[in-house]
Image: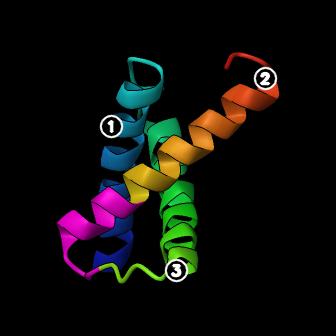
Amino acid sequence: MDGILIWLIVGGIAGWLAGLIVKGGGQGILLNIVVGIIGAVIGGWVFGQLGVTVGTTLVNSILTAVVGAVILLLLIGLIRGKR
């Protein structure tokens, strides 16, 4: 149960930060969580492909998720034609 709560918190923070970076604002708590969790997967994959070792601290998890979430939001913007 603790793991799920941490995923939700990390996802929410990462999605909110990515929204600030890409669009200038968040998208709402549920969408922020979804974007952040998907971003964590994308960020982990990207860093793995680059050979970057990501630590296991909460800060490292949030930074990884933010990077992935920014990539996700930029890709969505490209698909929608906004960027």
Name the disc covering residue 17, or none. 1
Q: Is residue 44 above or below residue 43?
A: below
Q: Residue at x 47, y 83 (%)?
A: 51
- In reply to whether residue 62 is colored magenta, the answer given is yes
Disc 3 and disc 2 in contact, CB within 8 angstroms: no
Disc number lying in front (3 or 1): 3
- Name the secondary structure under disc 2: helix
- Name the secondary structure under disc 1: helix
Q: CA distance from mark 1 to mark 2?
A: 21 Å
Name the disc covering residue 80, or none. 2
* Secondary structure character of the magenta stretch overall: helix
6 horizontally vs 75: left or right: left
Disc 1 and disc 2 in contact, CB within 8 angstroms: no
16 horizontally vs 70: left or right: left
Name the disc covering residue 48, or none. 3
Name the disc covering residue 65, or none. none
Q: Position of residue 40 (x, y in %)?
A: 47, 63
The quarter of the image holding the C terminus is top right
Q: Is residue 28 visible?
A: no
Q: Residue furthest front?
A: 50
- Name the secondary structure under disc 3: helix
Residue range (magenta)? 55-64
Q: CA distance from mark 3 to mark 2?
A: 28 Å
Mark 3: give few (<14), some (14-19) or many (20+) Cα within 10 Å. Answer: few
62 horizontally vs 49: left or right: left
Looking at the picture, which amino acid does disc 3 mark?
Gly
Mark 1: give few (<14), some (14-19) or many (20+) Cα within 10 Å. Answer: many
Q: Residue at x 36, y 26 (%)?
A: 20
Q: Residue at x 57, y 57 (%)?
A: 38
